[in-house]
């Protein structure tokens, strides 16, 4: 069993235009106070998984392809999409990661105050805990799915092994549904609801150009691992059906550049090493999304069979 399946089975927790929104609200006050954000950012990282997987270890930022940049940590993906009219930031990593994310953005020559939209793949703390701090630093409009909005605004999820992992709550300004788009400065990101790992798991796609100027499709997968969550009984109602529907949906998708919010899911460091060695298109692999989907579906089926057998 490879690293990604071990991660799945082991129980590691793991012009401004917004079109097609199912809900729009005027930005309101922040839900987390300065004191909450600062306390969370300065707290030591004590979670054994976070330490082992190097979730808060610094990694120098770099450009993945075109206007898509990696500004996250060694183990957690955070992605900056830059445009002449402002920028889009996807995911927030840990609360303690906020200072280095902001430093990474500045190191690439961009200003965090120019971030217009914050997007989220899902509301587990390792991808959502930093959002409140990033919202405070940028003043950006926070966008997420309807199913994950309650968790983001509560600062915790109510199921699974991380249900007691509190994080600074973040105000969700706008809700996206499947196929909704976020457009900014010539870039357009499309939301794909891919529930399973969370009820509102949202993947994002966009177009970019490779080093030769050829058009490439980019797909950031929300997640398809179990992350230690129970299937029997389901961690939340409809979880099994959600996973199956997402695997079927992704089988019909194509992407030239596959991204994920954990380094191990898209071989981040090996690709970066090839990039540094001179391969400017190291992240281009038109077969990787389907390999990942097949691998995750296999792991899901094995885990489901094991848990069903254990309940007999």
Image (cartoon, rainbow, N blue to C red):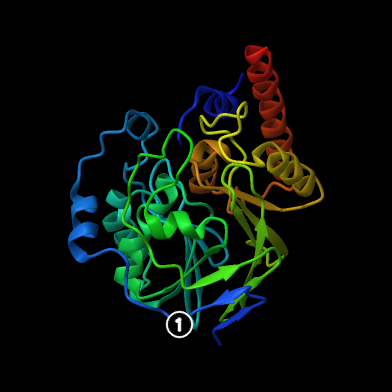
Q: Position of residue 116 (x, y in %)?
A: 45, 76
Q: Residues within 10 Å of mark 1 (few under 14, many from 20)?
A: few
Above or below — where is 295 with respect to 79? above
Out of 231 and 76, give the one closest to the viewer. Answer: 231
Above or below — where is 262 with respect to 132? above
Using the rendered image of the protein, determine whether residue 153 is visible from the camera's viewpoint.
Answer: yes
Question: Which residue is depicted at the point 45% across and 34% down?
Answer: 13
231 left or right, relative to 119:
right
Q: Mark 1 — residue?
A: 26
Using the rendered image of the protein, determine whether residue 91 is visible from the camera's viewpoint.
Answer: no
Check the image and name the residue furthest to the bottom. Answer: 15
Out of 182 and 241, give the one closest to the viewer. Answer: 241
Q: Position of residue 20 (x, y in %)?
A: 67, 76
Out of 141 and 167, give the one closest to the viewer. Answer: 167
The C terminus - image quarter = top right
Out of 256 and 179, give the one closest to the viewer. Answer: 179
Question: Which residue is depicted at the point 22% across and 58% down?
Answer: 36
The N terminus - image quarter = top right
Q: Position of residue 15 (x, y in %)?
A: 56, 87
Above or below — where is 14 with respect to 88? above
């Amino acid at each position: 069993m490879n690293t990604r399946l071990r991660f799945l089975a082991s129980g590691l927790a793991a012009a401004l235009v917004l079109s097609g929104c199912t809900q729009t609200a005027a930005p309101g006050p922040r839900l987390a106070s300065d004191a909450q954000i600062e306390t969370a950012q300065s707290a030591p990282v004590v979670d054994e998984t976070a330490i082992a997987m190097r979730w808060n270890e610094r990694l120098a930022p770099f450009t993945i392809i075109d206007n898509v940049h990696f500004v996250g940590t060694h183990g957690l993906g955070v992605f900056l999409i830059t445009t002449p009219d402002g920028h889009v930031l996807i995911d927030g990593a840990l609360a303690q990661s906020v200072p280095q994310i902001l430093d990474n953005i500045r190191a690439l020559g961009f200003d965090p105050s120019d971030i217009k939209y914050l997007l989220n793949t899902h509301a587990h703390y390792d991808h959502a805990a930093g959002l409140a701090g990033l919202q405070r630093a940028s003043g950006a409009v926070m966008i997420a799915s309807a199913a994950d909005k309650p968790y983001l605004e509560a600062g915790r999820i109510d199921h699974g092994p991380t249900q007691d992992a509190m994080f600074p709550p973040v105000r969700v300004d706008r809700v996206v549904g499947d196929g909704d788009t976020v457009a900014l400065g010539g870039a357009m990101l499309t939301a794909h609801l891919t529930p399973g790992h969370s009820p509102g798991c949202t993947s994002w796609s966009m177009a970019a150009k490779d080093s030769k100027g050829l058009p490439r499709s980019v797909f950031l997968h929300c997640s398809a691992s179990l992350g230690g969550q129970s299937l029997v009984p389901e961690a939340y109602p409809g979880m099994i059906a959600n996973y199956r529907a997402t695997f079927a949906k992704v089988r019909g998708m194509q992407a030239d550049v596959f991204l994920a919010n954990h380094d191990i899911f898209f071989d981040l460091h090996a690709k970066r090493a090839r990039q540094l060695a001179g391969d400017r298109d190291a992240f281009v692999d038109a077969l990787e999304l389907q390999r990942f989907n097949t691998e995750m579906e296999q792991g899901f089926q094995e885990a489901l069979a094991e848990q069903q057998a254990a309940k007999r």
